[in-house]
Image: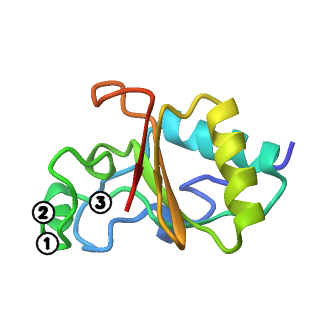
């Protein structure tokens, strides 16, 4: 199996943009991203992964954002077909928290936030 998402292979991919913390993705998130990418069969680019609470606040992130816990990632999406394929694959692979925007999807694996939810940005 091809491994697409690992912090070790591409440390910048999952580094907080503040550049001054060690926030890391949870294993649940990495597993979801890997399984979703494999199932969807289309390239996925993480545009926003883990970020520290301070940076999350600076950019106006949600109060209960999954990013500071390493449980959420935003995936760049172009086109309705890719949006469908990635959404379906994420749901099929256990994603219970999904945000949909014009150019990205938020995939979340938090076990403490509301479950089985889909929201629109």
3 and 1 marks in contact (CB < 8 Å) = no
Q: Which secondary structure, mark 3? A: loop
**Residue 64, horizontal then vertical, whole percent:** 20, 44
- In the rendering, at what x and y percent does residue 26 appear? 44, 39
**Residue 51, numbered circle:** 3
Circles 2 and 3: CB atoms closer than 8 Å: no
> How many numbered circles does the render carry?
3
| Real-space Cα separation, disc 2 to disc 1, in angstroms | 6 Å
C-alpha distance separating marks 2 and 3: 8 Å
Residue 32 placement (x, y as % from top left): 60, 39
Which residue occupies 26% across, 49% down?
65
Secondary structure under the numbered disc 1 in the rendered image = helix
Quick one: quadrant of the C terminus? bottom left
Q: Residue at x 80, y 43 (%)?
A: 39
- For residue 60, what is the image quadrant? bottom left
Residue for badge 1: 58
The crowd level at tag 2 (other Cα within 10 Å; few <14, some 14-19, many 20+) is: few
Q: Is residue 1 above or below residue 7?
A: above
Residue 71 is left or right of residue 47, and the answer is: left
Do residues under tags 2 and 1 come within 8 Å of each other at their CB atoms?
yes
Q: Residue 54, which numbered label?
A: 2
* On-image quarter of the N terminus: top right
Relative to the observer, which residue lies in front, 38 or 106? 106
Which residue: 51% across, 40% down? 29
- Secondary element type, mark 2: helix
Q: Determine whether, in the image, residue 79 is placed left or right of residue 50.
A: right
Decide which of tag 3 and tag 1 comes sooner along the chain. 3
């Amino acid at each position: 199996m091809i491994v697409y998402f690992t912090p070790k292979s591409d440390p910048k991919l999952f580094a907080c943009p503040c550049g001054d913390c060690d926030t890391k993705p949870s294993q649940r998130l990495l597993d979801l991203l890997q399984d979703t990418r494999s199932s969807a069969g289309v390239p996925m680019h993480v545009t926003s992964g883990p970020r520290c609470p301070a940076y999350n606040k600076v950019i106006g992130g949600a109060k209960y954002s999954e990013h500071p816990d390493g449980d959420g990632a935003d995936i760049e999406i172009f086109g309705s077909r890719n949006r469908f394929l990635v959404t379906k694959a994420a749901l099929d692979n256990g994603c219970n928290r999904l945000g949909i925007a014009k150019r990205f999807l938020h995939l979340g694996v938090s076990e403490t936030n509301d479950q089985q939810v889909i929201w629109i940005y």
